[in-house]
Image (cartoon, helix red, strand yellow):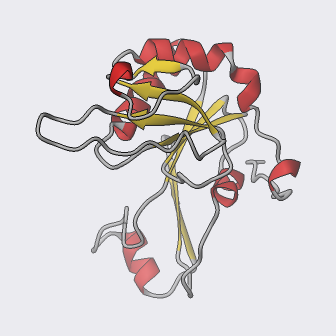
Amino acid sequence: MKVVGFAGFSGSGKTTLVEQLIPELRLRGLRVSVVKHAHHSFDIDHPGKDTYRHREAGAFEVVAASDKRLMLVREFEQPATLSVHHLLAELYQGVDWVLVEGFKDSDLLKIEVWRAPEPGQVAKPVRYPEDDFVVAVATDAAASLPQPTQLPLLDLNQPAQVVDWLIEYGHRFEYNWELHGGLLPCAPQ
């Protein structure tokens, strides 16, 4: 399993890029999962649904499954801070690539997403000068980057080129379970 992060300020295009990379990877016969950092108050369940009612009644976990999908919702009794590595351990291990959006301070190799500012706006700072885990920059304006870099520059508007680069350097993104705390992956039986 190969894992790559995508980091950048809100509005830089991380979600759009990840959304575009998924079908590009799928076209090449690869299975893709996504891990996304979410705000503490997010919910995927809805009032009135059976699963929501079970959670409201106090269930620690609710799993719903059909012949098309599986959903697991786990409620924490106390606030819990999970690392990206905890979340990776929850994924099905039969995937080729995991695209991680957010978790900008993680120790995963990542592509920084940087977009040129609109006229009249101030350019957002970049992370790559201080973050040794940034291995490339995906941007729509390489000539406008606030600081020079020797990192590979990927065209934010050409997802197929980004996938080409990921596949060419895929060996660098192979996830090492022992290196990241030895968390055991959960695999379906």
Q: Position of residue 182 (x, y in %)?
A: 86, 56
Point 66% across, 42% down: residue:
132
Point 44% across, 27% down: residue:
138
In the picture provided, is 105 more to the left or to the right than 115? right
In-front residue for pair 162/46 = 162
Is residue 104 visible to the viewer in this orientation of the structure? yes
Q: Where is residue 100 in the image (x, y as percent from the top left)?
A: 54, 43
Q: Where is residue 3 in the image (x, y as percent from the top left)?
A: 66, 37
Is residue 29 visible to the viewer in this orientation of the structure? no
In the picture provided, is 169 more to the left or to the right than 126? right
Q: Relative to 88, say whether 31 is above or below.
A: above
Q: Relative to 153, say whether 17 is above or below.
A: below
Q: Position of residue 36 (x, y in %)?
A: 48, 51
Point 32% across, 69% down: residue:
49
Q: Relative to 186, say whether 78 is above or below.
A: below
Point 39% across, 39% down: residue:
14
Q: Quadrant of the N terminus?
A: top right
In-front residue for pair 121/61 = 121
